[in-house]
């Protein structure tokens, strides 16, 4: 009797379980792979990059952007280490490292920077068409004279109102070249060091010791077209320059001015 009752209970439990819906299986969450940090930055503390800036660098092999009257072309180069930036509206083109990001609102016509070394950046400055009528880069004088003007402009821009700040500067080189487009360009390299005291208000002079706060290399390429002066500017810490000199010189060599309609 007890055996029959147990068998009936087991049959009823089996029938109930068959009538129940199995709970839905959950799919494991996808794991997003971490972006690979270039080897020269491993071991350093690097700032976070806003997602919109990261996405802005994920471009196809050749992308044309229409920004109002501007037409900008961004194209990959052979090997994938650089992108080519072409501004047909303002009239210039250059290569820049593919990992660099564009920063808007920096005051220049275009501005890119290294997302890992924030002191490393590049920009293009263009003279106003209404206030300048350049015929050739030789309007600046010889390269040495142009270098003096470039250095003076940098020092003016970096002028500080802080107490106890001292700047040391040197012109490292000034040269000219005729590029493959037949135009004459000037190339200028300067070094600027900044020293500051963290206790400038101290009473005793020995307590107002200045120390080096930054040491940078500035590289400029100057060219003239469309009656305007164009300047490609590169800024990098001296220690980084020693590591990346070949890449930075490739950027310098790539700069060209273009005739606009």
Image (cartoon, grey):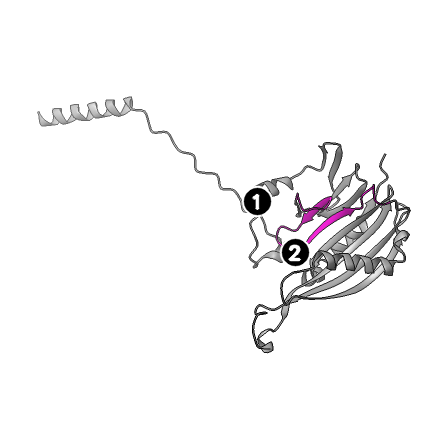
Q: In this view, does 251 lie above or below 163?
A: above
Query: From this viewpoint, is residue 23 visible?
Result: yes
Q: Where is residue 192 in the image (x, y as percent from the top left)?
A: 72, 63
Q: Where in the figure is residue 201, as x and y percent of width and height?
A: 57, 70
Label 1 neighbour load within 10 Å: few <14, some 14-19, many 20+: few
Q: Name the residue under label 2.
A: 119
Camera-side residue of 222 and 207: 207
In percent of width and height, residue 48 lies at 55, 49
Vertical side of 50 occupied by 159: above or below: below
Asked which quadrant contains residue 109, the reply is top right
Please identify the quadrant where the C terminus is shown: top right
Q: Residue at x 59, y 52 (%)?
A: 37
At 28% from the left and 21% from the top, the residue drawn is 19
Who is closer to the viewer here, 51 or 26? 51
Is-magenta flag for residue 117? yes
Q: Is the magenta stretch mostly helix, strand or loop?
A: loop
Can you say which quadrant of the picture contains the N terminus?
Answer: top left
Q: Of helix, strand and loop, which one carries label 1?
A: loop
* Callout 2 crowding tier (Cα within 10 Å): few <14, some 14–19, many ≥20: some
Please report the bounds of the magenta region as a residue range: 104-132
Q: Position of residue 14 (x, y in %)?
A: 24, 25
* Residue at which label 1 appears: 50
């Amino acid at each position: 009797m007890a055996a029959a009752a147990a068998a009936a209970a087991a049959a009823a439990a089996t029938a109930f379980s068959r009538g129940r819906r199995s709970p839905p299986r959950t799919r494991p969450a996808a794991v997003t792979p971490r972006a690979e940090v270039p080897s020269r930055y491993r071991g350093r503390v690097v700032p976070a990059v806003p997602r919109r800036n990261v996405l802005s660098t994920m471009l196809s092999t050749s992308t044309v952007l229409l920004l109002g009257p501007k037409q900008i072309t961004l194209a990959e180069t052979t090997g994938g280490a650089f992108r080519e930036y072409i501004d047909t509206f303002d009239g210039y083109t250059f290569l820049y490292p593919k990992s660099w990001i564009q920063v808007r609102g920096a005051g220049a016509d275009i501005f890119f920077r290294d997302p890992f070394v924030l002191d490393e950046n590049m920009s293009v400055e263009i003279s106003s068409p209404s206030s300048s009528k350049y015929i050739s880069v030789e309007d600046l004088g010889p390269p040495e004279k142009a270098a003096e003007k470039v250095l003076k402009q940098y020092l003016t821009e970096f002028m500080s109102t802080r107490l106890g700040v001292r700047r040391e500067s040197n012109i490292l080189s000034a040269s000219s070249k005729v590029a493959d487009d037949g135009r004459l360009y000037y190339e200028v390299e300067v070094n600027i060091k900044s020293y500051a005291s963290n206790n400038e208000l101290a009473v005793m002079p020995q307590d107002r010791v200045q120390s080096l706060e930054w040491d940078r290399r500035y590289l400029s390429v100057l060219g003239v077209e469309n009656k305007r002066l164009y300047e490609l500017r590169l800024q990098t810490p001296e220690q980084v320059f020693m590591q990346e000199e070949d890449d930075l010189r490739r950027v310098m060599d790539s700069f060209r001015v273009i005739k606009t309609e």
